[in-house]
Image (tube, rainbow, N blue to C red):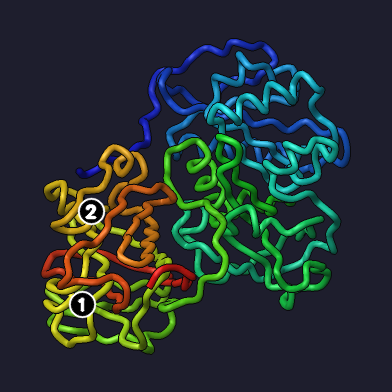
Amino acid sequence: MRTTGRLTTAVAGAALLLGCVAGPSAAHPAEAKRVLVFSKTAGFRHDSIPEGIAAVRELAAQGGFAVDATEDSTAFTAKNLRRYDAVVFLSTTGDVLDDHQQRAFEGYIRHGGGYVGVHAAADTEYDWEFYGGLAGAWFQGHPAIQPATVRVEDRAHPSTAGLARTWNRTDEWYNYRSNPREHAHVLASLDESSYQGGTMDGDHPIAWCQEYRGGRAFYTGGGHSKESYAEPAFRQHLLGGIRWAIGEAQADCRPENGYRPLFDGTTLDGWQQAGPGSFALSEDGTLTSDGGMGLLWYAGRSFGSYSLKLDWKAQGDDNSGVFVGFPPSGDPWSAVDHGYEIQIDATDTPDRTTGSVYGFKSADRKKRDRALNPPGEWNTYEIRVEGERLRIWLNGVRINDFTNTDPSRSLREGHLGIQNHGAGDQVSFRDIRIKELHGPR
């Protein structure tokens, strides 16, 4: 089933219920997503806060959501917070909420609320354990403002999908008291060799996301300076984080550790094309299907028990798929006849549409539809094979669970590939990576 764009066009405005909150950024329908920007400080105050608020208001007009802004912590009541799809902590510092306000915010998150932390949001509420877990890590210190290289680790999340693999920019680069990688999904990290003053032993996350106790949490360490909020790439990074936090875009924000690349965007070593057509490799590390029906398969070796992850994007009602469990062959039909295809196709029949095991088992279509981003936006598959069991996650949501019982096919050992389906079908892939598991063979 094809999804349509989820962004809502801005029309008539809605009246505010609290006088302590500044007016909305633009006129929006009552059902539009709404964000609260909170910028109270009880410690150091960044002079970029007004620019940050103005930038979020401008991004709201672009992203189709409404914005209120306040520094009044009395806005943190259960009743008022229910009006918002996410709360942006914009360079807050120190203890900014009392015990009652903290409990209201905890309840808001537990009931599915969104959190966006910007820069000094990590320098906030050190005695509140729930907040530390939500933000992901607390601030430790920082060197002088200077240029650095940001390594983009996830190029499917809406906050980083539009960035190159390396992002060179100037900011005040925070060091953190702990590394969030084990419990959060790291979107971008700093190359500590590219600047002076990094203290995280070469593994220095700077932006991350996570599902936290019922809610969604996104944090970016950027945003110290006024200039950040005029920087197009940083603005799109911030907009993508907000869109994910309010549920307007989907992504896999589960922690991801232990994977190694099969295709990292630079080389196709180990891969072979079977059958007609091809995949074009662009400078930004994206493979895009052309013609067919063929298969680009990993001939370097076969795999048994594993988790395969890859990012994909369809331009429209396009057809492609990911094949697993097939024997080595230069004939793409060998994969069709002896393996299994995890389908990419917006509008085919239930057992042949996105998330299905093609011809064998439909995805849970309600879950699939909620998890699926529309054409033109990136999605992430996890395909997990253990013995004869095949499970599929779309943007972090499990949508299919299939067990092979056909003696002429086996998932216990086989090759992997991506399909170029035919003329007019244009599907792109990025960052194909694998983690081998200890499980039944």
Amino acid type, mark 1: Leu
291, 269: nearer the viewer: 269
- Residue drawn at (11%, 69%) of the image: 423
Looking at the rendered structure, the secondary structure element under dot 1 is strand
In the picture, measured across the screen, residue 28 lies left or right of residue 274, that is: right
Q: SS class of the residue under badge 2?
A: loop
Residue 41, image quadrant = top right
**How many numbered tags mark residues here?**
2
Q: Say which residue label 1 marks.
A: 295
Q: Residue at x 28, y 75 (%)?
A: 417
| 38 to the left or right of 404 | right
Residue sitting at x 27%, y 87% = 272
Image coords of residue 300 (percent x, y):
36, 88
Discs 1/2, front: 2
Measuring from the top left, give residue 369's x and y in whole percent.
29, 41
The quarter of the picture where residue 207 lies is bottom right
Q: Label for residue 356?
A: 2
**Residue 427's spot in the image, x, y percent?**
25, 64
Q: CA distance from mark 1 to mark 2?
A: 18 Å
Q: Residue at (58%, 47%) from the top-left corner?
A: 210
Query: On the rendered structure, is 193 left or right of 388?
Result: right
